[in-house]
């Protein structure tokens, strides 16, 4: 019969007598707290920052809030093709399409545009698939990551909130 190495898990996780003593863990925890207090107060080695007054720089690969882009003429890029909506694994995107009319100068010259474009941030998992699937380079996850809100409505990104302003940056950072 093959020689099998048996690990005695119960033995490996046996606690010393003092580790079973309730106050041992309290004292160890207090020690860590006091160590960080002195490092922060007297040595200037705080691991936290005073948010929101101070903010950390985001990585170039960070996926933040979604934005909808305009082309070089300032027209909305989205053609309401629904690719992002169908590929979204969290079912977080809702689009209503409408016909582009000749008087809609702010739109691209194709057939459809997104009359309504909502993203439910409570469903979104920030996978970035909508950005990858978009054939028009219309949607990017290049916003910040500040998602705190005290009601559900503020966590629904509407087209108006996502659409790039006229005169803003024309293309996304990964375009
Ligand atoms: S990032 Fe992912 S989960 Fe969020 S809206 Fe885009 S496809 Fe959906
Ligand atoms: S954002 Fe892109 S993928 Fe989504 S509907 Fe508009 S054009 Fe299509």
Image: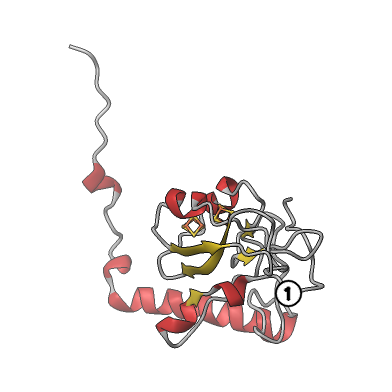
- Foreground pick, 125 / 81: 81
- Foreground pick, 89 / 150: 89
- Foreground pick, 55 / 42: 55
- Foreground pick, 21 / 5: 5
Element class at badge 1: loop
Q: Position of residue 95 (x, y in %)?
A: 47, 63
Tell whether 114 sits left or right of 121.
right
Q: Is 82 drawn above or below residue 101 in the view shown?
A: above
Q: Position of residue 9 (x, y in %)?
A: 25, 43
Q: Is 38 drawn above or below residue 113 in the view shown?
A: below
Q: How is the image coloured?
A: secondary structure
Tell whether 15 sits left or right of 162.
left
Image quadrant in which you'd find residue 104: bottom right
| Label total for image | 1
Image quadrant in which you'd find residue 19: bottom left
Residue drawn at 38 percent across, 79 percent down? 26
Residue furthest top in the image: 1
Residue drawn at 28 percent across, 51 percent down? 13
Residue furthest front in the image: 102
Image quarter in which the N terminus is found: top left
Residue drawn at 73 percent across, 58 percent down? 172
Tell whether 88 sits left or right of 175.
left
The answer to whether the residue bearing label 1 lies less than 8 angstroms from the nearest atom of ligand 2 is: no
Disc 1 packing (10 Å; few <14; some 14–19; many ≥20):
some
Residue drawn at 33 percent across, 79 percent down? 23
Tell whether 93 sits left or right of 68.
left
Q: Is 70 drawn above or below residue 131 in the view shown?
A: below
Q: Position of residue 143 (x, y in %)?
A: 65, 68
Q: Position of residue 129 (x, y in %)?
A: 52, 49
Q: To which residue does mark 1 refer?
A: 165
């Amino acid at each position: 019969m093959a020689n099998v190495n048996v690990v005695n898990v119960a033995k490996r996780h046996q606690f010393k007598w003092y580790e079973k003593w309730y106050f041992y863990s309290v004292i160890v925890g207090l020690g860590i707290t006091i160590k960080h207090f002195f490092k922060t107060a007297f040595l200037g080695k705080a691991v936290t920052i005073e948010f929101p007054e101070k903010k950390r720089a985001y990585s170039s690969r960070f996926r933040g809030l979604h934005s909808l882009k305009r082309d070089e003429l300032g027209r909305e890029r989205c053609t309401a093709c629904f690719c992002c909506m169908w590929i979204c694994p969290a079912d977080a995107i809702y689009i209503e399409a409408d016909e582009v009319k000749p008087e809609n100068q702010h739109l691209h010259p194709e057939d459809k545009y997104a009359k309504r474009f909502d993203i439910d941030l409570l469903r979104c998992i920030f996978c970035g698939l909508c950005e990858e699937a978009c054939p028009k380079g219309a949607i990017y996850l290049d916003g910040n990551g500040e998602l705190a809100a005290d009601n559900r409505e503020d966590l629904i990104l509407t087209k108006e909130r996502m659409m790039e302003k006229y005169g803003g940056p024309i293309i996304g950072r990964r375009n």
